[in-house]
């Protein structure tokens, strides 16, 4: 038996287990790495003078993304938030609607709903996936909504619940089979927030390709980065065409005339950011392998630490292990803040999950179901250093 | 007398006058150039791994922009449209309001108004500046609005007219003195759309620094570019703080907690785009000098061409001459499309001004004043090749 588990505090044990894997240097939560063609493509982009929203790297990035994810169409945009805004809009979300999203998510999911003039409606998560709990949700919808003319109406508010947006938390796929059946049975458009799950598959299919549309993020803290960036995935050619139109200035093609036929959003990803993305995508398989290796090393290292579990990808799923996640046992929940303090003080960057959405002032009046699992999880989740480069560094 | 002016068509004369200046090569309307530290700074940015929304280049770009424009505070964002959205929001524009904007503008000005849930209200321009005509506007507001509790109300619609957004067309400053007095007298917030006028001054002061806030664009077609990018200018520290907060995810500072206290928009400019911007800004004075030189050469060349005038900066103003502009004499208006065809066919990229905003389907129901000057102008304006590199190329 490990001597630490008898004598050391939980914080000391966790720090030791992390140090075993990453060594003694300071470590941030997630750091990008640029060891491939990034430099080469950026130079090529500059030399072409096409750095803005038209250029070969944007087209190539979209093609490469489609190939990697298996989505028929992709549209590259300035970030994951803007991708979600347009996906929700094209899913038919209108002012006055409600949209079901997990309370346990990053704030962008909720913000994008409000950009459409709609109201987030918060649902609970399950511990197994950290994503939307379809069994609990079905029960809730049965009791709190009714179908009127093929639309799901919230009995209490009288508003149409137009869509559901599961989010694949820290890269772990939510229960898509269960969620798709609920979406179908209650007439909800399914839009996947796959901001965190590039490289994660559910039953062999890439996350973000199950719903009407899915969205990705390439922010600096994600598995791959374009500086700032995001993408919309869809298998519907008309939705793809429309998404591209709305993410530009919605200009009609003409040799010189400037005529626009809709409100556009100017969300198109610049070519220079896409140049970075093309190089990063080439290295994605290697980065995913490194992140999986990091998970294996953490698993071995945390095997003897009592009171915490390392989050493992759900059954039949392949997680990208974007952020490695510790889940404290319920009786250790009170230790979370001490653990955060001790690790960060020791130069090991860790963080808790986000404050639950309904606990933010701006969303405190939004409708919600019982959120007991999300509440429990948020008190017990801690993300630990997860960069793919940690594997190389420690080797 | 030039033989061409007797025998040649207007199109032939215009093509010859342009060729005299730019030589016989093909020419696009506006092309960026990257002859300074662009490459060096991009490399430094990659090597630092800080490519996203935090990094030294974003901070430096904001500081350098403040120094160049004389604005006390600047906030760098993903594009000019997003800058305008946030500026309007912070100027108090709310759902149900109206905002006065020129009918003769790029569609982004109108789109940004709608993002706030407000309605554009179109006003006329004057031929001298190509910008909002304050004398005509004052007369219109006198007859069509009334003051209620310190707010300007449209008598016909009953809606509050919250703000006015002059745009400095093709880089030529609008009549800011006149517009500021109208804004003051009718209780309108003044937000300047200076997307096209980086480097343009009105009575010695940089455009975009006269109103409550001003906005810039660094799109690929602008005087300097960051791939995609924009900025908010203001002299008010609280507005600047709030703009920065809203253009991120509105997160409260904390070592690890993710708590956001407002709806944020995730509009922050990535560090990699700012790296490009820092290098471009260093070269801005030289590019402005080259664009002015290009204007002088065009002026000499078009001196003998009857039927068109080259747009000259308004009195006491310094224009950046972003896009060189021909104004056809009224009797030549019918020749505009022939001229566009002939020049583009000859490999000289030209374009007309934008279709007027109220003629776009999505804005056809918006309120508007008499727009006869804008109508006349839009039938007579043609932009001709304007890249600063044309001066170097022709030398």
Image (spheres, coloured by chain):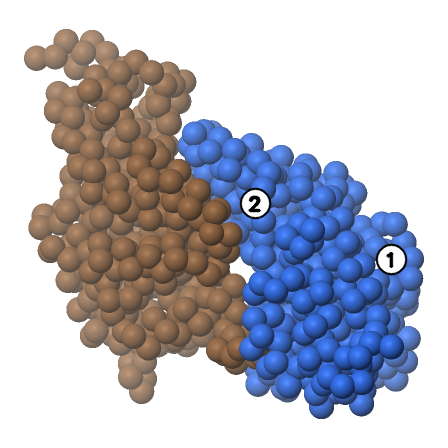
Chain colours: A blue, B brown
Residue B57 or A338: which is nearer the viewer? A338
- Mark 2 is surrounded, within 10 Å at the Cα level, by few (under 14), some (14 to 19) or many (20 or more) other residues, namely some
Mark 2 element type: loop
Q: Earlier in the sequence, mark 2 or mark 1?
A: 2
CA distance for labels 2 and 1: 28 Å
Question: Label 2 marks which chain's residue?
Answer: A
Residue B220 in the image: above or below residue A345: above
Residue labelled with disc 2: A34
- Displayed quadrant of residue A297: bottom right
Q: Is residue B219 visible?
A: no
At which x and y percent is residue B258? 58, 76
Relative to B145, A231 lies left or right = right
Q: Which residue is nearer to you in this view: B320 or A207?
A: A207
Quadrant that contains the N terminus of chain B: top left
Residue B123 in picture, x, y percent from top left: 31, 58
**Residue, disc 1:** A317
Left or right: where A94 falls relative to B155: right
Q: Is residue B299 above or below residue A307?
A: above
The percent position of residue A230, horizontal first and vertical second, equals 61, 52
Label 1 resides on the chain identified as: A
Q: Nearer the viewer, mark 2 or mark 1?
A: 2
């Amino acid at each position: 038996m490990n001597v630490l588990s008898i004598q050391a505090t939980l914080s000391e044990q966790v720090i030791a287990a992390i140090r075993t894997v990453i060594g003694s240097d300071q470590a941030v939560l997630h750091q990008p790495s640029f060891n491939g063609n990034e430099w080469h493509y950026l130079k090529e982009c500059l030399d072409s003078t096409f750095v803005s929203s038209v250029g070969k790297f944007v087209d190539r990035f979209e093609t490469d993304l489609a190939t990697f994810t298996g989505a028929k169409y992709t549209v590259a945009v300035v970030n994951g938030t803007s991708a979600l805004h347009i996906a929700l809009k094209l899913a038919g979300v209108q002012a006055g609607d409600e949209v079901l999203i997990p309370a346990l998510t990053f704030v962008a999911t909720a913000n994008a709903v409000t950009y459409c003039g709609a109201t987030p409606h918060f649902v609970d998560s399950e511990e197994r996936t950290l994503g939307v709990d379809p069994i609990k949700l079905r029960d809730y919808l049965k009791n709190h909504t009714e179908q009127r003319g093929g639309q799901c109406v919230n009995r209490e508010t009288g508003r149409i619940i137009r869509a559901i947006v599961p989010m694949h938390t820290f890269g772990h796929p939510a229960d898509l089979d269960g969620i798709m059946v609920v979406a179908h049975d209650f007439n909800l458009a399914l839009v996947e927030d796959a901001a965190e799950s590039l490289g994660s598959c559910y039953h062999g299919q890439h996350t973000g390709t199950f719903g009407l549309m899915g969205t990705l993020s390439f922010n600096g803290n994600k598995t791959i980065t374009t500086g700032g960036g995001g993408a919309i995935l869809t298998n519907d050619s008309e939705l793809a065409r429309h998404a591209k139109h709305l993410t530009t200035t919605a200009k009609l093609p003409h040799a010189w005339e400037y005529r626009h036929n809709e409100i556009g959003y100017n969300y198109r990803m610049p070519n220079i950011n896409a140049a970075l993305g093309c190089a990063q995508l080439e290295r994605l398989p290697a980065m995913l392998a490194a992140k999986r290796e990091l998970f294996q090393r953490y698993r071995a290292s945390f095997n003897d630490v009592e009171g915490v579990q390392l989050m493992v990808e759900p059954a039949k799923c392949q997680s990208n292990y974007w952020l490695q996640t510790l889940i404290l046992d319920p009786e250790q929940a009170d230790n979370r803040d001490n653990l955060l303090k001790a690790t960060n003080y020791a130069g090991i960057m860790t963080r808790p999950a986000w404050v639950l959405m309904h606990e933010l002032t701006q969303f405190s009046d939004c409708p919600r179901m019982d959120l007991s699992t999300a509440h429990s999880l948020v008190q017990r989740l801690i993300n630990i250093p997860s960069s793919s480069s940690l594997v190389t560094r420690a080797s």
